[in-house]
Amino acid sequence: MPTRVCCCCSALRPRYKRLVDNIFPEDPKDGLVKADMEKLTFYAVSAPEKLDRIGSYLAERLSRDVVRHRSGYVLIAMEALDQLLMACHSQSIKPFVESFLHMVAKLLESGEPKLQVLGTNSFVKFANIEEDTPSYHRRYDFFVSRFSAMCHSCHSDPEIRTEIRIAGIRGIQGVVRKTVNDELRATIWEPQHMDKIVPSLLFNMQKIEEVDSRIGPPPSPSAADKEENPAVLAENCFRELLGRATFGNMNNAVRPVFAHLDHHKLWDPNEFAVHCFKIIMYSIQAQYSHHVIQEILGHLDARKKDSPRVRAGIIQVLLEAVAIAAKGSIGPTVLEVFNTLLKHLRLSVEFEANDLQGGSVGSANLNTSTKDNDEKIVQNAIIQTIGFFGSNLPDYQRSEIMMFIMGKVPVFGTSTHTLDISQLGDLGTRRIQIMLLRSLLMVTSGYKAKTIVTALPGSFLDPLLSPSLMEDYELRQLVLEVMHNLMDRHDNRAKLRGIRIIPDVADLKIKREKICRQDTSFMKKNGQQLYRHIYLGCKEEDNVQKNYELLYTSLALITIELANEEVVIDLIRLAIALQDSAIINEDNLSMFHRCGIMALVAAYLNFVSQMIAVPAFCQHVSKVIEIRTMEAPYFLPEHIFREKCMLPKSLEKHDKSLCFLTNKIAESLGGSGYSVERLSVPYVPQVTDEDRLSRRKSIVDTVSIQVDILPNSIPSDDVVSNTEEITFEALKKAIGRTLKLFHMEGVVTLLF
C-alpha cells in the first residue's frame, strides 16, 4: 500500500505531488485511477514547466516500489508515464524524458523478467514518439548494452527466455528508430554499439530452423511472426538497421557480422553466412553494394591461412553478394575483386602443391588427399565466382578483365606474366595455368563482339595462343575452348559438337553473315598464326579425342565466321598438310594419333566442301570417304574414336585413293572460279620463339628440317624470307631430299 499522510500535511504538499499520489489506488489490483490521471494530464499540459518535477516524483515512487517488489504500483507508475509522454510535446518534456529513461533503466536492471518486459514496452512507445527538437546530449549506451544482454537471455524457462529475447530485440529496434534518423546524433553507429547490436540480432537469427536459400529477396515476415518469433523479429530489425545505414557508417554495421561468423565457426557449413549476406545485400542501398564486396574481400585476405573449407565458405558468400550486386551497382571494385580472387587462387594452388610435396606414407597420405580435395573446392569456388562476376560485366570491362587474367597466366621461359610462381614448382605452375584458363573460359562465356578484332586483339591473341604449344593436352583444350567462346558469334558451336562425318551440313542450319572488312584484315594479319597453332596442336603426342574434336571445331568456326575464298584455300592447304604429316610421321606419332589426324582431315574437308558448295569438290571428298568406309574405317572419326578400334600396322602401303589429293581438289575448285595457285604450295608453319619457350621436344626440330634444307636446294639469289613465297618446284625438291633421308620414298606417290 502507498504511504498515506494526514489531511493537514496533504494540504501543504505541492499540487503535482497530490495529483500523482491520487492516481495510485488503495489496492493496486484496481489499476490506475483514470479520473485522477485525467486531472494529472490536464495539469501537466497546462503547466509544462512542472513536467520535470512530476517525472522526478514518479521516478522516486517507482524506485521505491521496485526495491520493495510492489509490482502492481510499478505497473501503474509506468502506465502513467506512458500517458504523460503521449500527451505532452512541449520543450519542457526534455527533463521529463530523462526521468522517464531513468525509470526504464531501473526496470531493466531488475532481475524480474516481468519488469524487464514492462520497461522495454515503455521504451518502445517512447521510441515511436517524434520529438519536436532533438536532444543531442542524450545517450543510449546503457540501453544498447542492456537490450543486447536480454537478446542472449539463458533463462531456464523456455517461454520466459523467449519473452525476454523478444523484448531485447524490440528494445534494440526502438533504439535504432530513435537515433538513426538524426544525422547529428550518430552515436548508435559507433563500433562499440554495433559490436553489441549486430551480434545480438544474428544470435537470434541463427535459431531459424530452415535457412532460406532463395535467389531473390526473401519476403517480409507477417505481423504475427514478428511479435512471436525472436528469429523473425531479429531478422526484421537487422533489415531495418541496414536499410538506414549510410555511406559513412556502412562498414561499422557489416564488420560485426564477420566477427560473429568467425567466433561461432559459421563459414563451414556456410548456409547461415550466405543467408546473412543475402539480407545485407538486399537491405542496403544499391549504391553501397561495393562496400560490402570490399569488406568480404578484406576478410578473405585476413583469413587466407584458415582451412580450405572456411575460405571456400567466404568465397561462396562473395559469389552470392556479387550475384546480387551485379543487378545494380558494383562500383569501382571490379579489378580489385579479380585481383584478390586470382591471388587466392595462386595461394590455394601453392598450399595444394606444398601438401603434395610434404605428404608421407600411411595416414598422412589420407590427410593430404583430404586437404587436396578441400583446396579443389576453394579453387572451383573462385573460378565460379570469377565466371559469374565476369559474365555480368559490360563488354568493355569484360575485355579488360580478359586481358588482366591472361596477363597472369605463366608460360615457361617467359617473364611477361605478373603472377608470382616462384613457390609453386612445375606441378603447381601447371595447376595455376589450368585454373587461370578455366577462369578465362568462364569470363569469355557468352561474350559477343561485333568484329573478331574486338574479341581477339593482338595483345590478347598472342599470349592466349602461347599455352596452346605446351606439352599438356588439358591446357591446349582450354585455350581452344576460350577461342571458341570468342570466335563463335552466331552460336553455331553446339551444332558442331563432336567430330563426325556430317551427311548434310544444311541440316545443321548454320548461321553466318558476310565477312566484314575488319574480319578480313584480321585473317590477313593473324591467319598464319592461327593455322600454325592448329597444325602443331594436331601433332601433339598426348592428344586425346577431345583435343581432335576441339581442333575440328576450330577449323569449322574459322570457316563459318572468318573465311573468304583466300582463307578457304589456306584451310584446305592446312588440312592436306596435316594428312601428309600423318603419313610421313616425322614426329614419330603413335598409330592412334596418325589415324586421328586422318579422321580430323576427313571430317573437316567434308564440312568445308559442303559449306562452299562446289559439286566437284564434294564429289571427291565423298568418294574418298566412301572408299575409307569400305577399306580403311580407322581413317574416319566414327571408327577411330570408338573403343577397341582395330588399327593398321602401317600407313605407307595404303593406296592413294584413300587420301584427299591436291590436284583433284585444285581441279574442282578451279572450275568454280577459285584461285587455286596457292594450293600447289604445301603449307609449312614458320618457326617462332614460342616453340622454344613452351618445352616442346619436336616442334623446333620438325619445322627446322623443313626450312633449313631450303638454302641448299635453291640458288642464293632466289632465297626469300617468307615461307609462303617459296615456289612449288623448289619446295618439292627440298621435301623430296628430306624424305630420302628418312627412307620413305613410297610416300612421295601419295604426296605428289
Image: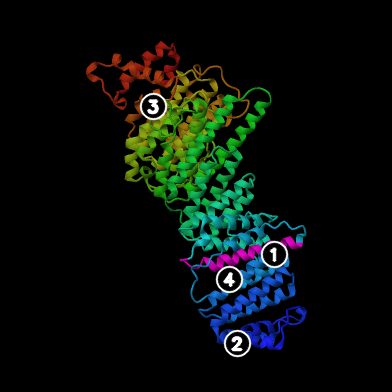
What is the crowding at mark 2: few (fewer than 14 residues within 10 Å), some, or many (at least 20)?
Answer: some
Looking at marks 4 and 2 on the same chain, the residue that comes earlier in the sequence is marked by: 2
Q: Position of residue 149 (x, y in %)?
A: 65, 58
Side of 42 where 684 appears, left or right = left
Regarding residue 525, the answer to whether it shows in the image is yes
Looking at marks 2 and 3 on the same chain, the residue that comes earlier in the sequence is marked by: 2
User: Disc 4 versus disc 1: distance between alpha carbons?
Assistant: 21 Å
Residue under pointer 3: 690
Which of the two residues, 653 or 590, is positioned nearer the viewer here? 590
Residue under pointer 2: 42
Looking at marks 2 and 1 on the same chain, the residue that comes earlier in the sequence is marked by: 2
**Is residue 165 highlighted in magenta?**
yes
What residue range appears in magenta? Answer: 159-184
* Residue found at the very far front of the displayed protein: 8
Nearest to viewer (mark 4 / mark 2):
2
Nearest to viewer (mark 1 / mark 3):
1
Residue under pointer 1: 110
Nearest to viewer (mark 3 / mark 4):
4
Element at label 4: helix
2 and 1 marks in contact (CB < 8 Å): no
